[in-house]
Amino acid sequence: MSWNEPGGGKKDPWSGRGDDKNVLELDEAIRVLQGKLDKLFGGSGDNQDNNDFSGNSLKGLGLLAVGAGVIWGLSGFYIVDEGNHGVETRFGKYIGTTQAGLNWHIPSPIESVALVNVKQQRFIEVGYRSNGGDQSIGGSVPKEALMLTKDENYVDVRLAVQYQVKDAKAFIFNVSNPTATLKHVTESAQRGVIGGSTMDFVLTEGRGEIVAQIKTEIQQVMDSYNSGIQVTSVNLQDAQPPEQVQNAFADAIKAREDEQRLINEAQAYANDVIPKARGAAARKLQEAEGYKEQVLAQAQGETSRFSQLLAQYSKAPDVTRKRLYIDAMESVLSTTNNVIVDVKNGSNVMYLPLDKLAQASQNANTAPVINASHVSSASVEPPPPPAPVIQSAPMSVPSTEHPNGRSRINDMRGR
């Protein structure tokens, strides 16, 4: 029955009067609870007067507070793993950085610690998403990837930037969102470098230089922010023209490759022919130089020989003339098999060398025998005419020298 219904009596909640039974039950519950706490902290558990009961209660509450304080103090211990740094703050203010190992700080809410992995290699993707998000088209993000080059051409550039934390304090306090900041800085540096380069340079030989410039600019900007980030590498994942002109660009690249191939072939042919021509020319020059030296040496030798011979001839003309004659005859007759002996006041007699006679005799013995009855008169040839007899006569020695440094008489000796 409600307190304001007829017959409900004086049971309103503001009068302080009502159901005394509920009050007695509440008092009894409190006394039971106090008895249990008294037993827990060393009380006897029997009913005592109010002074004893109050003292035991205060003692139990003190012990409970001490235990809670010990537990609270122990909660301040924490472990920093290898490769991490702990950044301690007191009411949000930086107080220190702890290294790997067991450390302690005043428990929360007075002090707190934030663990930062300074060895982890983190990375961001600019111009593409490796997981193929909703905003990507085949992994590419056109809003980030498409940019204008110096020669007013569009290129699709995709970068992957790897970085790590070099200063945990700066990484937490100096930049509100380090990852987003690094991404914005990367896009800005990338567009600046690509905008200062031509399309062919970006797509062909300039990739390494472009990556180095982008990395340098990113690090300079992040250092100016004191972000505590160290950029370890910048990788150019892909650089290509937009999809709409890729076929035409592929044809242009193929034509450029054919041009380079033909240039290389022509250069290889030139490298093969030019050294040979230079070698042949050098050989000709050396031969001409050698011939020149030979002619000069021969001329000088002939001149010196003639001068010496002239000096001797001037001293003894008869002896020198006779000596020249003997040398000339020796050189002429040394190459013939006929020996002519000049007998004074007699006739010249021709002799054959004995070795030639012996050889002729052997050839006659080994020659086949021919039956004269089978030889017709037409096949018999007349004997050869006798060799003419050479009449020796004194020879005059010319004074003209041969160009090769020998006298004409000596030259006749070698013929």
Image (tube, grey):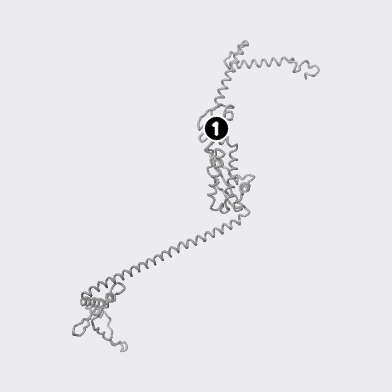
User: In the displayed image of the protein, which residue is found farthest to the left?
Assistant: 345
In which quadrant is the C terminus drawn? Answer: bottom left
Image quadrant occupied by the N terminus: top right
Answer yes or no: is residue 289 visible: yes
**Residue type highlighted by circle 1:** Val
Q: Position of residue 290 (x, y in %)?
A: 35, 67
Q: Which residue lies furthest to the top in this view?
A: 49
Q: What percent of the width, then of the height, locates residue 302?
A: 29, 72
Front-most of 207 and 318? 318
Q: Is residue 41 toward the left or the right of residue 373 in the image?
A: right
Give the number of callouts.
Answer: 1
Give the residue number, with chain letter if any, for mark 1: 87
Query: Label 1: how many residues lie within 10 Å, few (<14), some (14-19) or many (20+)?
Result: some
Residue positioned 81% across, 17% down in the render = 6
Q: In this view, does 141 lie above or below 37?
A: below
> Residue most toward the right?
6
Query: Between residues 404 and 12, which one lies in front from this camera angle?
Result: 404
Q: Where is residue 88 in the image (x, y as percent from the top left)?
A: 55, 30
Whether 331 is drawn above or below 125: the answer is below
Asked if residue 230 is positioned above or below residue 148 in the image, the reply reads above
Tell me which corner region of the image, top left, top right, bottom left or bottom right, holds residue 48: top right
Residue 102 versus residue 234 in the image, above or below:
above
Residue ID at (28%, 73%): 406
Tell me if residue 365 can be seen: no
User: Where residue 344 appears, x then y in whole percent?
Assistant: 18, 83
Assign a secondary structure to mark 1.
strand
